Image (cartoon, rainbow, N blue to C red):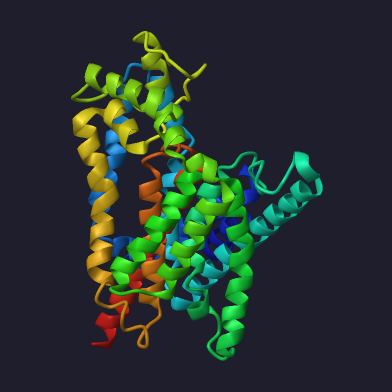
Amino acid sequence: MCLTFGMLFYVLFFPLGISFREIGNITGLVGLAVVLLCDYRQSNVRLYPFKWSYFVFIALIIFKIFHSEYSGAGYYALRTNWYKGFLIFFLAMEFVNSEKNVRYLIFAFAIMGFYEGVVGVVQGIDLINLGPEGPLFKHRLVGTFSSARVGNLLAIVLPITFVLPVALPRKWPTWVRWATAVTVWLPMLFLLFGAGTRTGYIGVVVSCLAFLVIRGGASLFFVLGGALVLLGLIFAAPERWAWEVISHDNRVVDVWPIALSVFREFPLLGSGIDTYDVVHRSMGLFPKVMKQLPHHPHNIYLQFLCETGVVGFVIFIQYLFFPVWWLYLNIKNRVKCIRSSSNWIYAAAFLSSYVGYLASGFTGHNYFRSWWLGISMLVLGAAIGICLHSLRTVDNKS
């Protein structure tokens, strides 16, 4: 009961602030502890074949806290994320132990994305009412967030909700299921466009392409996703996609070159977890264009390259992509047979969403940004849990 309440509460109220996420997170983890203590042998966690990869990565982080130019930064990153991010992976994995729970999770994402989108619509109407000084999309929409980072959240949520026509009750007429799904999507699309978050657009289009590859053919998911991204680029923020703008972006001019300089100074083992800001200052590296650099390289791959070196980067890559490859191999041939179980198409949607997150990580946030790490670990854990449950169901039937 605690696990179910915590998981759904966490997702439903995710955008409303840290306090709501903490309530859902901690409640769910208490439930997870009870489940694992009482019935570990039947848990998805026990069946997951890449637990070793997860724990090797955690060991890397702990090692690089002590082997660091500034241990305090790494300690803070782990202290604020061990339960807000890393443990949510197992919470989501264990929650999706039935198709009913999977559908509940999809509905929770849909409700959360819908009301967040409605807030964006209201903001957009306010901008219209401002007249010439504030036309639609002239200013970036933020939803309940304090910045346009809401686009990164929607890039993760939206691909999951594209399976709503499958997840909604089959006794509903087809047109009702589709009408409901479109009603949910439209406010999210409006806010996604209005936020003008380029990393969000990248995440959505890559999610659509990933689903196309997994599904093995052109699908409505891909058509809708491609259409929304193209419309977004044309109408939402075309000036942010001009070559002149991208080539002179602060990340290209200042942030990434300095991250590479830090890597060249610490090529083997890196400078230490979350030390980019401290180290580049101590090395006398300062931006040419920006007044002040962000506290991270704005690229999770460069972040681990300069902060953990080649050794840590290899561990980081296997931690990210081994589960993706395992999921792809298990889902790709089964997702076509959705008449026997819708779980495979649900798993494909969660996996596609996570692949989009990995793509947005090339230009996105600090890896240790708690809300971004938490939602990504939830999505990956859910994809793995759905796959494990479905494989176990097939084995039991045979």
Looking at the image, can residue 161 be seen?
Answer: yes
Q: Nearer the viewer, residue 126 or 85?
A: 126
Q: Residue at x 48, y 64 (%)?
A: 227
The answer to whether residue 384 of the structure is visible from this angle is no
Task: Name the foreground residue: 393 vs 293.
Answer: 293
Is 223 left or right of 146, judged from the image as shown? left
Q: Quadrant of the C terminus?
A: bottom left
Which is nearer the eye, 20 or 372? Answer: 372
The image quarter containing residue 253 is top left
Tell me the quarter of the image containing the N terminus. bottom right
- Asked which quadrant contains residue 338, the reply is bottom left
Side of 351 relative to 305 (left or right): right
Residue drawn at x 51%, y 61% as measured from the top left: 228
Coordinates of residue 232 in the picture (x, y in percent): 53, 54
Residue 342 point in image, percent of width and height: 40, 80
Q: Residue at the spot x=36%, y=16% of the render?
A: 279
Q: Position of residue 137 (x, y in %)?
A: 65, 47
Q: How many labels were placed on the picture? A: 0
Could you say which quadrant of the image residue 112 lies in? bottom right
Coordinates of residue 41 in the picture (x, y in percent)? 31, 67
In this picture, is 81 found above or below 273? below
